Structures are given as C-alpha cells and as structure tokens.
Image (cartoon, helix red, strand yellow):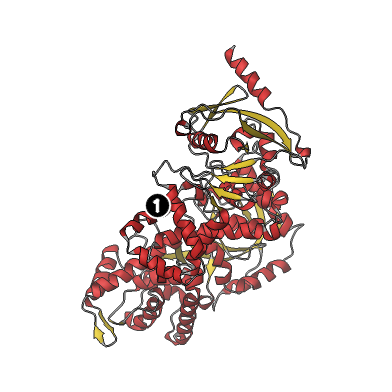
Amino acid sequence: MADMKAEKRYKSLYTPLDSSKREIRVLGFVNKPLEKKREREDPVSLTLSVVSLDDPGHPPFSALSYVWGKPVHNNHVTVDEVQMAVTDNLHLALHHLHGSRAEENWWIDALCIDQANLDERGSQVQMMSDIFGSAAITVAHIDFSVFKPKPQVSMSLLTTMAKLRGKREALEWLTKVRRDPDFNARWTELYLLFENVYWRRVWILQELIVSRNLEFFNPDGPCLDITTFAQALQIFEDITPLKLKLGLHISHQIRPIYEDLKFRAMYWENRTPQPQGLRQMIMNSLRLQATDPRDHLFALLSFTEDGPEVIGRAAYESAPSHVFAGFVQRYYHKYQSLELILLGGCKRKLIDLPSWAPDLSAYETHVKGNIMIHEKIQEKNFPITLVVQSLLLAAPFPSSPVSFSDDNRTLTVTSIQMGEITGLGGYTKGSVARTIDSAMGVRQLDSTHAKNSELSSSSLDRNVLFENLAQILTLGSLPEISGTIPPILLGQALTVLLHYAEEPHEYEKRRQLGVSTLSGWWDLNKDLSIDNKTLLSWLLGDNLTLEEREDELVRMFRTTVLEYEDTVIEDAFVFLKRVYLRIRFDTEMVQRVIVYTQDGELGSGPAYCNLGDEIWMLYGCKIPMILRPLPDMNGFEVVGECVMYDFMVKEMPVLARKPERCTIR
C-alpha cells in the first residue's frame, strides 16, 4: 500500500509537458538554510513548477551543470513533499546552492525531467540548447571531493593568469613564481582542477557550448566566469610550453578544453546561436565519456545544424545498435558518403552492432592516437584513391551503389579489392593481445614467403634510410651515426614517421619533409632491383627470431659510434636507447601497424589488423578500408581504415581490377 501511494505521488509530481510550447520544469528552494556553517547538514526541500520557454514573461531560472557520477542514490531530497533519491554529486551541489543561492529558480536535469518517461527524456534532450541558452546563468559545479583540492587556490591562479594574457610580463611572472615553492602547491591545485572527470563528459561539452552565460562555482569564494576562464587558458597558447618549461602535463590537459571553448565562441558568434556541423562535433567529442552510449549522439543533437536530420529524435527506447546503424544510414542518404564507417576501426564495447556501424563509446579509453589519425588521414592518403573512386562511379551499378538491408544489419556496396595483407610490421600495444617484442617485427604467412624475402644487408645502405628517419623522429637533434642499424628499428621508425604521434601543428612540416625524403630515396634506389614486397619484408622483419632481434639491437647500441660537432659522444648506448624508447612510445600512441600486400603495396592500419585481412576501396568512402572475411565466407566485417602511400605503390595493379559488390555485416 505504501509503495502504491509513493508511486501516485511521483506521478502527480511529473504532469505531462507540452513540447509544442517548449515547456520545462524548474525547481525552487522552499526553505532557507538554518546556519551558513551547517548548510550541508540542513535538509533540502524543493518545489517544482512548469514554465514555457515561449512565454516571454516566464520567471528567470538558472541551470546546473554537473556530473551525475556513480549511479548510486544513497541521498534524498524532498520535492513537493515527495522524497527523491539523488546521487552524491547532485546532493552536494544542492547543498551548496541551498546555502548560497536559495533565492534562484533552478533547472536540474535529474529532477526536472521525468527520468522514467522515455518520450519526455527524448523530447527534453532535443531542447537542451534552448534550455541552457535561455537560462540567466549556468552554474558549473565541479565535485572536488575526490582529490580534496582547494578550488579557491586554482580559481585565484586562473584569475591572475587571465589578467596577464597578452602581456610580455606574463612569461617573466610565470618564470619567477615557478621558482617559488609556494607556487608549486598552487600549480598542483590547478592540475587537480583540470584532472577532474567533469571535463571528460560529453554532456558537459554540450553545456559549455550552448550556455549563454556560465560560471564555475566556488564554495570558498567568488565564482569564476567563463570569459575569465577562457582568457586564462589562452595564456598557454600565447606562450609555448617550450618557453614556459613548466607544467607541460597541464598544457596537454588544457588543450582539449581550450578547443571546446573555441566551439563555444563559434556557437555564440554575435551573441546568436550558430549550430555547428555534426561530423566536426563527433570528432571533437570522441574522447569524452557517457554512461549511456547513445548519448554520444544525443548530446550533440540540439546544437548541431544537421543533427536533427541525421541523428533523428533522441529515441531512448531504441537499442544502441539500432541508433548507431540508423545514424550511418541517414548520414549516407543525406551526404552520399560512407565516411562514418571509418570510425568502426576500434575495439568495441557494444554487442549486436554491425561492424560498419561505429561504436562511438569505444573511443573513450584510447582515443588520442586514433583522433590524430582520423583528422589527418585524408591528407596522408595518396591520390590514387580518387582514381579508384572514378572507376567506381563509372561502374554499371544496380539501382544504387550502396544499399542497406531492411533490418539495417547488412551493408552492400560497390567496391574494388586493392590487395590482401601478407605482412605486418611495427609496434602494437599489448592491449590488442600482442606483447611489445613479438609485435616489433613482421609475421610471415609461411616459410616460402620468408625465404623469398631474404636480403643481403649489403644490398641497401641502411644508414641512409635510418638517418633520414631518425633525423625527423628526434626533431633534428640526432648526431652523425656510424655503424649498422638493424632493420627492425627501421621498421618502427617508419611506422612513427608515417603517422607522427605528436601535435600535428608542431610536427606536420617535419613529417612531410621525412616522407618526401623517403620518397626520393625510394626513386633513387630503383636500380637495386628490389621489389616492394621483398624490401618491406627485410625492413620490417629481417627474418630473425625474437632473441636474434633483441641481440642485434643490443649489439647496435653497444658498437655504434656517435659524433656531434666533431665530438664523440661517450655513452652512445644511453642516447640510442632514448631514441629507441621514443620510437616505441610514439608507435604506442598512434596505435598503428605497417601493412603490406602480396603485390608489395605499403600502407598502415589499426593495431589489430591480421594477416589475411583485405584492403578494399568502397564507393562513398574516400579512404581504403581493411575488411576481414567472415568465417563462413559470406561477407566481411570492418577492421578499420587503411592509409596507402604513393612512394610504395608505383607498380600497383589496382587499376586493372574490376568493381564488384561487397557485403559487409
């Protein structure tokens, strides 16, 4: 009987909203805190009312931006005499607001939306940009309870930095205070602020962008407004980390937040909302987390120009697999592009998802290298893909070059097979079931292939190739080398060079120079009569056992002579070991492997490629895809995107191949 009464009171609390009037609910505090110092102990009592955003006379309200946290509801507040369970994070935020801003009306998603009503949840999600844009202020409440930092210290430091933005004395001030022991403690507080999970949630990205006015709550002092916050972050752009020589890890923390604020500036250009492109926002938000995988799309719905058409409605009643597959299909029908399946090249969390439908939730844990690849991959891919697309366009298509099955499980697309992967090289991470050492070299299909790939070390000038590569990898600081460089190290250096894991704007010119050098070297050595396949087998594998590879590396480190400005470097081993470790670190960052085919084409793919995978060029996809034949040979599954390099495909026979229909499941 008590449960029935509670359910009845709950239903009376959430009367239906009229979406045609853009109705929302807002909260008001019923009671004031008894004592300021006891505010966290006082019970919180709230009342709920309905307002229409279309009513110009609606009462002003503020919005709360916060992280829900663990789905454990051990705390309670009272809303119109109904006891409501809330998470720890919301409970803390309500007590803070109760103690300092109890006179304001508040929109708080967990309480203002009937979370048990899926239709209402979807409808309110599509109004998020209107809600936060209409709020008088959005208050960002960051839970500082995990690391116990002092928000007043970090916010005070940010305020000081904002005042110094664009001034020459900024560098002098930072250099001076860096030597002050007290400053180190303040810098630690700033680090803890940016380490907070708040910055890693996809809903927070939306709230940072669409809130007309926003400030960060400070329980110990004045709040920090978003303009001051952005100006403080700008100082890391004005003064490069190399000059700053402090807090480099903080600089890396700040970069994605600073990029988010750029989107905010574009959205509120001229103080009028300017919706952004969906694809760009997806790429920017892949690194972020969401409890519900569907929210990787739904959180972008209200503030992207093409979101409503491509994503559709926020259908929480639909399974994630249905949401993501439908998203790819609608994107293709709007743009005649299958580029979204490029995001399928990632280990998946979701089950029952077609391989061509990206699991956007799977990028959260290892996104850095993948994002760099996806952002730059089209520039790196060689122009023959345009020729292949021309062949696909001229092919005698059936009714459509791309078709989806009625159950949205199967994709059939006109394609050209570019080759089968017969060799893999370079470093791959242990998370893809390979140890560091076993992944350092190439895995051969059979002993015949291994014998055919043997090369005499005298056939090539190893030093010429490696010095060009290493000069790039060490930012031009590598001294002159004399000695034999093992090809296994060349293969790893090649992997890094072709993807470069560092910040693109800093190192892209150097990478382009390296690729150009490599291409020129390739052309000049054509008279060696070494075909691509044989050279790559030598470069990436050398047909050595694991122990032999390790021994060769040690011998090279111990016997190589290094000279710098006519001075012999005594501890060459330490220096070369540092180069080697850097290469291993960078190849781990990019999560890529070198691949080559039976015809000797060179490319690269995700770290979990296998021998026997196939490279295909698909209609509507500007980049070759690596596909894996299904066990029953009745189609393929997507492995990921493939980069093909022009200086290694001069003899590529792909143009002689005919388009065919490819089934992907």
Q: Is residue 458 left or right of residue 571?
A: right
Which one is nearer the viewer's eye here, 652 or 213? 213
Q: With 367 as the anchor, is 447 left or right in this view?
A: left
Q: Is residue 398 left or right of residue 132?
A: right
Q: Residue at x 69, y 55 (%)?
A: 275
Task: Name the residue: 44% across, 61% down.
Answer: 251
Residue lying furthest front: 35
Q: Nearer the viewer, residue 413 or 26?
A: 26
**Residue 609 seen in render:** no
Position in image of residue 337 (x %, y %) = 68, 60
Instruction: Specify whether residue 80 is in view.
Output: yes
Asked if residue 368 is positioned above or below residue 18 in the image, the reply reads below
The residue beneath circle 1 is 189
Q: Amino acid at mark 1?
A: Glu
- Asked if 592 appears above or below 110 in the picture, the reply is below
Circle 1: is it few (<14), some (14-19), or many (20+) Cα within 10 Å?
many
**Element under label 1?**
helix
Q: Nearer the viewer, residue 111 or 519?
A: 111
Quadrant where the N terminus sits is top right
- Where is residue 315 drawn, in percent x and y? 67, 40
Query: Quadrant of residue 573 in the image?
Result: bottom left
Extreme residue toward the top, this view? 1
Residue 210 x, y percent position in the rendering: 64, 51
In this figure, what is the number of numbered marks? Answer: 1
Give the image quarter of residue 427. bottom left
Q: Residue at x 52, y 43 (%)?
A: 141
Q: Position of residue 16 (x, y in %)?
A: 72, 29
Asked if residue 558 is positioned above or below residue 259 in the image, the reply reads below
